[in-house]
């Protein structure tokens, strides 16, 4: 019974762990691969994979009948905006400041949006957990060394955090009437189409190399389609703000992979930050089960839209 109650949390965390492999995977990409182009290819491969899964497992749900594009548009646009905003922020203001601002602001912004637009009161447990998780994220990334803070870069990072928060909130609303797979597939396909013109702007010759193909497949299939599908399945049963806070497992995973696979080193302060971040996850997932939405007991993978 306890395991069943914790399953939505575990699904979100598993999705975030897969997101955490993105940075490590990109280190194996060809040097000519521009981060924005990589992000665009990631969405293209991920959207195509999700669409194929939808046609294979739930082809009836691929029908656009009853699908509100007006309601889905914020999710499509926000996911399309996240990639260039995040990579631009990291380029302009550095990995540490860009990552902390984007990922750290997302759960706070999601909580504010829930209160403002959905009148949902946030719990003290969520507040404490989010505070610990964001503080741990800051400690994890802000190491000794020169930190350059550029206002425009910080603004882009906040835009990335807001994009992820909006995606989480609107996706949850869409999944009240449709399956997680159909919503994720249609949203990501739309986002990929919006970013497709960027492929004519950036060099994509690196896709002809085996490293480029391998990295693109991993980012698209594992770190996008599988990751966001797991996140969406968990999102159906927990509040959006809670899911976004749990997604801070992503930088934790990235840091661990950086140490053991890329050979990076972390200070004692960063290791302590990991413990603080983990403590936030424990606080958030150890409470009582959150109220389910009205579709909480429905099938979440192959549910056909009504």
Image (tube, helix red, strand yellow):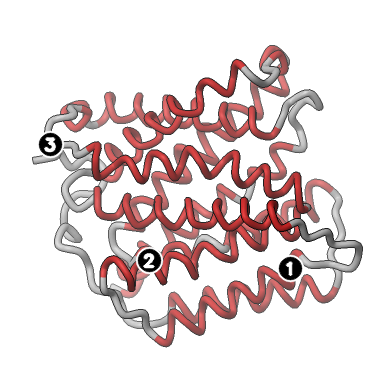
Q: Residues within 10 Å of mark 2 (few under 14, many from 20)?
A: some
* Residue 21 appears left or right of 111: right
Above/below status of 62 relative to 200: below
Above/below status of 50 relative to 199: below
Tell which of 244 and 5 is nearer to you. Answer: 244
Does residue 45 appear anywhere in the picture? no
Above/below status of 280 relative to 248: below
Q: Earlier in the sequence, mark 2 or mark 3?
A: 3
Residue 66, label in figure: 3
How far is mark 2 from mark 3, CA to CA?
26 Å
Q: Earlier in the sequence, mark 3 or mark 1?
A: 3
Dot 2 corresponds to which residue? 113
Q: Are marks 3 and 1 in contact (CB under 8 Å)?
A: no
Label 3 secondary element: loop
Dot 1 corresponds to which residue? 140
Looking at the rendering, which quadrant does residue 172 occupy?
bottom left
Above/below status of 196 relative to 275: above
């Amino acid at each position: 019974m306890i395991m069943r109650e914790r399953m939505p949390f575990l699904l979100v965390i598993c999705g975030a762990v897969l997101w955490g492999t993105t940075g490590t995977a990109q280190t194996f990409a060809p040097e000519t691969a521009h981060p924005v182009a990589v992000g665009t290819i990631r969405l293209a491969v991920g959207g195509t994979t999700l669409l194929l899964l939808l046609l294979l497992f739930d082809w009836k749900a691929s029908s656009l009948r009853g699908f509100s594009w007006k309601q889905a548009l914020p999710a499509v646009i926000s996911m399309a905006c996240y990639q260039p905003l995040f990579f631009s922020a990291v380029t302009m203001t550095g990995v540490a400041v860009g990552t902390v601002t984007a990922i750290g602001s997302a759960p706070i912004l999601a909580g504010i949006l829930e209160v403002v637009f959905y009148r949902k009161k946030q719990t003290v447990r969520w507040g404490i957990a989010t505070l610990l998780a964001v503080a741990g994220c800051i400690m994890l990334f802000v190491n000794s060394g020169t930190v350059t803070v550029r206002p425009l870069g910080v603004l882009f990072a906040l835009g990335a955090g807001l994009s992820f928060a909006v995606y989480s909130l609107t996706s949850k609303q869409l999944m009240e009437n449709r399956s997680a797979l159909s919503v994720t597939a249609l949203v990501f396909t739309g986002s990929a189409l919006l970013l497709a013109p960027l492929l004519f702007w950036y060099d994509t010759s690196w896709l002809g190399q085996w490293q480029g193909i391998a990295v693109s497949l991993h980012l698209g299939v594992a770190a996008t389609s599988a990751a966001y599908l797991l996140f969406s399945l968990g999102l159906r049963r927990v509040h959006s703000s809670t899911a976004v806070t749990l997604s801070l497992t992503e930088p934790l995973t990235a840091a661990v992979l950086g140490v053991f696979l890329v050979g990076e080193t972390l200070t004692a302060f960063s290791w302590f930050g990991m413990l603080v971040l983990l403590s936030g996850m424990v606080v958030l997932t150890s409470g009582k089960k959150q109220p389910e939405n009205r579709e909480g007991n429905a099938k979440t993978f192959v549910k056909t839209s009504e």
